[in-house]
Image: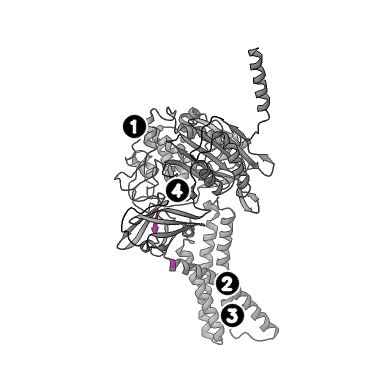
Amino acid sequence: MIKKITILALAVTLLLGSFMPVFANVNTEEESTPTGIPVSGLQEEIDAFMEEHLGTTAPGAAIVVFHNGEIIFSGFYGYADLENGRRVDESTVFEFGSTGKLLTYVSVMQLVEQGLLDLDAPMSNYLPADFYSQLRHTEPFTMRDLLNHSAGFSQNMLNNFVLTSPDDLTVPELTLEEALLSINPRQIFSPGTGSAYSNFGIGLAGLAVEYVSGQPLYQYQWEYILNPVGMTNSALLPDWRDNSQILANKAQGYVPIGNHDFTNVGWFNGLIYPAGNINGTMEDLALFAMELMADDTVLFESNPTLDLMLSPSYSENGNMIGTYHGFIRSYAGGRLALGHGGNTAGFTTDLVMMPEENFGFVVSVNGSQEQLIIDGLFDLLMDDLSQVAQPVPRYDRLPSAEVVVGSYVTLGRTVDNFLEFVDYLNMISVEFVDENTILVSKTGGEAIFTQVEPYVFELTEVISATQPSWRIMNRIEFRVEDGAATHALVGGWDFTALPSGRTLPILFGSLGVVIASVLFLLITPIVLVVKAIRKKKRDEMVSNKDFARWQLATTLAGLAIILNNVIGAVRFLANQWEMLVSGINEHFILNYIFAIAILIFSLLALLSLKKGNVKLKSKLTFGVSTVLILLFIVVLINWNFFVLY
């Protein structure tokens, strides 16, 4: 009888199970999240959250929550492929973006554990000599510097990646060395003195793993990370040849274009793949995350190595707080939360874990630069940032906050190519509120900070949080020298006061020149042509034909150089995730041609003035337009629009 009842109960369980929603898998043990949500309530809470947010910034998402080494919730929402009506499920493959850097960090620490790498030895020990000699650096740097993003290299977004589609998977066939040297930015600050996010630096760390281990990085990671962890639904290489079968389940990447609509932007392929080119399912990523908190992890021979990895990686002299050996710390109500986010052209991913609670979650959405869902899930599951504790000053007397007011740009800014201006569009602005309070704004986000120590401010209130994520940027430390703030350490990343030549008057002056030149030179050719036509209809003689001819030629050449750069900018904005040098040089070559033509035409116009018979109004028009054209060229030179690659 008991046996029959058992069989009947099993049958009923299987029958009911067949009607469970495909989008969720819940472990019903009464555990709870750090925010107090019982496991049995996760589906209701997360479903309600996703119903409110999904479809505005991304069409689809996958979420996996884990605790004590077990997956306690898996949720799959929306569409992986809008064009074909394919929904997100447990097999859907997403782009991890920079979250994949964690695999490179683990690879490094595995070799550190084996004694094959020393975090504080010069990287010349671990990179091929002929390759190392070609790097544009003046000071030695270490693996610790690379993990802390403090090796001193500037940014260079050119030649980093390409976009493909299911119909065209063509990716440049480059070795990791070739990909790195095609970028090869210049070292612009002393290693260990600051931190500036660097894909190039993590690429160097990956190359060091190749050189030390004696095998390609992707083979090393399959052997020592993916296979041991069980990440069978993932791929590492830009062309997916290490696991091409996952392509059948890969989601499409989208950019929101308003009113719950999206445009397909294709698939991202990072040529420096150690910096974040992995594709995979969220359950694969969750398996990896759980091993980072396991009591007997398969990633290392002993847990002390894991403990070391999840500790602060200070600079060798102890003066600079770095990352947690590559992991980034987030605000979690005073508790330790570590992880790493990732963005590609059409995907946003995050891995967050709280080692002390052995709790975490992974999430990926097929929407570009999506932060609302990511931050909202953190609030829901780990800690509500809106309930941040009010910081309390720890000193009786503190210096005036007015000292730190100003604009700051990333320490590792682009310096050698035309994309330098992008960093100045993403400056941090600090405004004075009162003696101990500042308003900080950056790319659409604003927050209030309170001074708790001399020139150290902590997050008080989030005003808007479209970008950036304030849970990472929750503390700002200013460096003040001779009564002026020179640096701002924001959430672990260094910003500096604007350098000479890039002060606000110069920035706004450059913008003013561009606007004035564009408006004036769009109108002037029309005016000159209309004027010539009217004179012809009236049978009026042009008093100085040579001057009129060269004036028009100068103006048209000025208009041409403006249009050339406008077209280049439109091409960039239309495909900003795929900027190969081959598509840029043609515009800069034309800049040289048009600039030379402008100089020749304007000189001929000046010489023709000797013939006289030119009205003052025409002279003034020519003078103003020529000056604006020349100032426009100066701005282009100043912002590297004449640099050939």
Q: Mark 1 or mark 4: which comes first in sequence?
A: 1
Residue that carries the numbered disc 1 in the rendered image: 115
| Separation (CA) of disc 2 from disc 3 | 21 Å
**How much space separates mark 2 and mark 1, taking CA atoms?**
64 Å
Q: Which residue is mark 2?
A: 519
Residue at 67% across, 44% down: 82
Q: Position of residue 336 (x, y in %)?
A: 42, 41
- Quadrant of the rendered image containing residue 546: bottom right
Write down the residue under mark 4: 472
Residue 9, x across and y down, in percent = 65, 20
Q: Which residues are magenta?
A: 494-504
User: Does residue 36 appear anywhere in the picture?
Assistant: yes
Circle 2 residues within 10 Å: few <14, some 14–19, many ≥20: few
Neighbour tally class for label 4: few under 14, some 14-19, many 20 plus, Cα within 10 Å:
some
Q: Looking at the figure, which quarter contains the N terminus?
A: top right
Q: Earlier in the sequence, mark 3 or mark 1?
A: 1
Specify the amino acid type for callout 2: Leu
Q: Which mark is residue 548?
A: 3
